């Protein structure tokens, strides 16, 4: 009988090969079992996840992530596509972000997604290990880093901190405010469509908020 779930690793990530013929509920059970058995092997690493051989919907992606998180100590920071060059670039950038913030005594992590108009507010720089859905918001006196999609609102530099920024794997915000400067898109994107990952960083330059592709070199300048 064909194994319904195969787990393979790549640098800074894991690939799940899922049998397209196996019922999805059986796939979830197998994922839960395998990650539970390998909990000590994987440890508490932060990794990207790639899903192959089977097309999955967004709700199915969420259930897969929940199964992994409940049965392991892994931080799944994103789901990547098949553009290997782009994947390597943003995974390196995010690894740099996490290392940089981990060494900051005032930095903190939040594991989970914000939805249903939830608001997360802190005086510290923060990394959100999840998505910020429409209607929800992250508010920080310093920097905001979202290892997922920003589809809601983000406020950084609330204490007047110069050089504050907002970074996200997918940058499609309803609103961003950095210090006294505000940004609101003229036309709202369909946040549920994830054809291409666009990791970006927003910061203030020449008295306005600008967006640039997230790279390790760019983050090193902050």
Image (cartoon, helix red, strand yellow):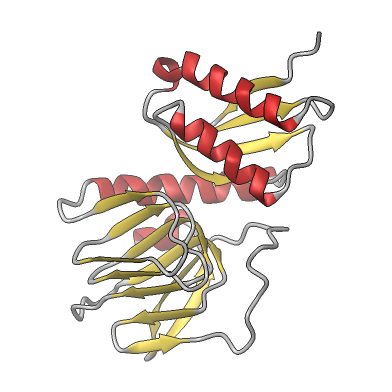
Q: Is residue 203 above or below residue 104?
A: below
Q: Is residue 178 above or below residue 26?
A: below
Q: Residue at x 42, y 44 (%)?
A: 95
- The N terminus is located in which quarter? top right
Residue at 66 percent across and 63 percent down: it is 192
Nearer to us in this view, 138 or 28: 28
In this rendering, position of residue 83 left or right of residue 201: right
Residue 22 image offset from top left, x and y in percent: 79, 25
Q: Is residue 179 above or below residue 128?
A: below
Q: Is residue 8 in view?
A: no
How many numbered markers are drawn?
0
**Residue 217 lies in what quarter of the image?**
bottom left
62 with respect to 190 (left or right):
left
141 or 206, nearer to the observer: 141
**Residue in view at x 55 percent, y 18 percent:** 33
Query: Can you name the residue that lies furthest to the top here?
Result: 1
The quadrant holding residue 114 is bottom left
Question: Front-most of 2 and 115?
Answer: 115
Q: Quadrant of the C terminus?
A: bottom left
């Amino acid at each position: 009988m064909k194994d319904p779930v195969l787990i393979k690793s790549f640098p800074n990530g894991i690939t799940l090969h899922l049998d397209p013929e196996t019922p999805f509920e059986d796939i979830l059970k197998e994922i839960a079992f395998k990650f539970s058995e390998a909990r000590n092997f994987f440890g508490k690493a932060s990794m990207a996840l790639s899903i192959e051989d089977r097309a999955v919907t967004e709700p199915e992606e969420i259930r897969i992530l929940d199964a992994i998180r409940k049965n392991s100590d892994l931080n799944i920071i994103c789901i990547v596509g098949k553009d290997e060059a782009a994947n390597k670039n943003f995974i390196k950038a995010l690894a740099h972000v996490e290392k940089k913030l981990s060494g900051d005594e005032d930095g903190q992590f939040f594991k989970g997604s914000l939805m249903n108009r939830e608001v997360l507010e802190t005086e510290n720089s923060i990394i959100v290990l999840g998505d910020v859905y429409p209607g929800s918001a992250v508010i920080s006196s310093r920097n905001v880093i979202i290892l997922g999609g920003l589809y809601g609102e983000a406020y950084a530099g609330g204490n007047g901190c110069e050089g504050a920024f907002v970074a996200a794997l997918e940058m499609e915000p309803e609103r961003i405010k950095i210090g006294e400067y505000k940004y609101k898109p003229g036309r709202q994107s369909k946040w549920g469509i994830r054809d291409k990952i666009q990791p970006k960083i927003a910061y203030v330059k020449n008295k306005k908020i600008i967006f640039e592709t997230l790279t390790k070199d760019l983050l090193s300048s902050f």
